[in-house]
Amino acid sequence: MRSVLGLLVGIVVGAGVGSGVARAQGAAQCAAADCAALQQVWQAAATLHEAKLQFIAAVQRVTQAQAGLFGDERPQLEAAVTAMRRTLEAWDEGIARFVAATDRLTMSADLRVARGTVLLDRHRMADALGELNEAARLAPDRADVPALQALALGAQGLPAEALKALARASSRAPDNPVLVYGQAQRALESHQPADAQRYLARVAQLLAPRMGDTAAAPQAPFERVGLIRQVPGLAPIFPLARYAAAYAALASNDFTSAGTAFAEAMQADPLGRSGEPVRGPIVGAAGALRRGQTGEARRLAESAVSVAPGDAEAQRVLARVLWADDAIEQALEHAAIAVRLSKGDERARLLHAELLASAGRSGDTRQALEETVRVEPKSGTAHYRLALLHQADGRLAEARAALDQCARLNAIVGQDHIHFLQGSIAANQADIDATIEAYARRVDVSPNSTEAHRQIAEVYFLQGRDDEALAEHSVAVLLTPRNGRAHGGRGQALLRQQRYAAAVAAFRLAVSAGDDRIETRYGLGVALTRDGHPEEGRAEIDASQALRSKAIAQGQLEFEQAALRRAAAAAQQDGRHDDAVALFERVLALDPGSGRSQQDLGSALLAAGRPGPAVQQLRAALETGPTVETAAALAAALAAVGDEAGRTAVMARHAQLVEERRRDRVRALTGAP
């Protein structure tokens, strides 16, 4: 038996163990005589994880290359698709050898767990459940086995069955808040809100003793079966529509079909299909742009277009190079040509829309994106950008519809952010049920996100659902023990439950963690007063009132500044430059250190024919916050007063700022450090 296990470590090439908890328990619960052998099984299982990581890395390379930002990515795309298929084959071969080798051993619950975990990590859910069901039969008292069963069942879209499995796990580990929280999630998904509330109340009860330990390290206790980890806060990245079927296959755990779909989509992709003598200059331009050599990139891209003006890819590459070289209008012209030459090219359409947005042409941007989704309804990027435009314009129903479409289009990363936006817009529309539904999906895809738990807690609190609010804020504290807002949220829920001493403790933790919001200090004051400490309570209430007065004054200041700026802009449009100057002087008086206000006043003075005072304001603005626009305005003012030496010096500074902006744009476009 030991010789077979020894071979396992050397011959298996593959993927990973899905549950560190299960692995640890499996090794710990074995009989002493079998522990060494079982440890070798787990080592072999862990060795398989490398193939999964290689597979994920290949998918990531495919994702980067299929975007085709520079136009030279076809070789990388072909190599990445090939690597993805080969690593999948190696992973599957390794698992087959692992299963065959362990078939020769005497089956135990530990061995079944090991096999089930390997299969779960490969997203072979039915096979994993077969092993785990056998493990449950052999060791019915273990908590880790039904917990793993719940993961597999949840990944198969069977929340009611997952809930039953979690009930079995929780009955064997009743003090584990992670299991109870999983029950709450699956109960919500199974449309059992009363049970979900009961489970969440239990979560808050179990976590209460841990809430005072702000020195504890942040935790990430929740597991999720998913190929690509969803990092909280990232803007979504969507595949191009032609690759959508491949990513959908990945999302449905059919990795083999995904590899085939990638290969088929790649064959029809125009990326890198330009013929010679165009392809060479395109590749050269892309390489030069990656190195930040925009002049050389522009020369090569322009030569490609001059040789083949009807080549849509050459036009698209030139447009991106011109954008990096700060020639936005020329870039727009060539992007529009690329769209006309290849009307179904999503890359060209998205670049054109992005350039229009960069030029500040929001109406044209919306039109370009709407045309993109008409031509290619599966363009997740176009739907997402449209949603942001609609949201900015206050068109919330349209924004919500676009985000709903985004949620169906398999964002590679950033699913967390899509659900956050869906919930935020629903909240603005006072659709609380939809808000909670969106935020619950956010928690589901990013279960270890402190902000996801904290924000759904705030919605629960607004609904008067104090048990749920307390539980979610408590989970947020578990994940980030020094999160002041989560402690403050716990305090508010406890205060409403009339648990005054506990509320005082939570509010004090919030303040010590940096939460100095008005509502937190006021809540602390009320809790102290009701807990029998009126003097301390009055001091906190007074402090909250001082904060409120300061916030009101700041809000009034910002409102007045915005109103004055709008009036000044209207005066400028009407040619009433003296009136604009007077209005901008009032703005600057309200905030004397503002570089923006200094620049606005300086530009208005210049337009009013008063270059001398304009120079003074624009110099101050350039020192406060140097921008290309400020330097250009100051140079014009210096020319107007006849200061040629000063104008020459400022133009040198202007050239430096232009170059810095160009380098920043190149870094943004290339992902360079």
Image: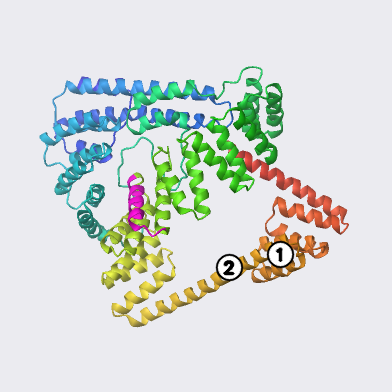
Residue pointed to by mark 1: 571
Q: Amino acid at mark 2?
A: Glu
For this view, does 269 lie left or right of residue 506?
right
Q: Residue at x 40, y 37 (%)?
A: 410
Nearer the observer, 489 or 6: 489
Q: Which span of residues is magenta-colored?
A: 429-444
Residue 217 in view (yes/no): no
Mark 2 residue crowding within 10 angstroms, few (<14) / some (14–19) / many (20+): some
Residue pointed to by mark 2: 558
- SS for dot 1: helix
Nearer the observer, 141 or 581: 581
Residue placed furthest toward the top: 276
Q: Residue at x 61, y 41 (%)?
A: 355
Q: Nearer the viewer, mark 2 or mark 1?
A: 1
Nearer the observer, 35 or 96: 96
Residue placed furthest toward the bottom: 535
Majority SS type along the magenta span: helix
Mark 1 residue crowding within 10 angstroms, few (<14) / some (14–19) / many (20+): some
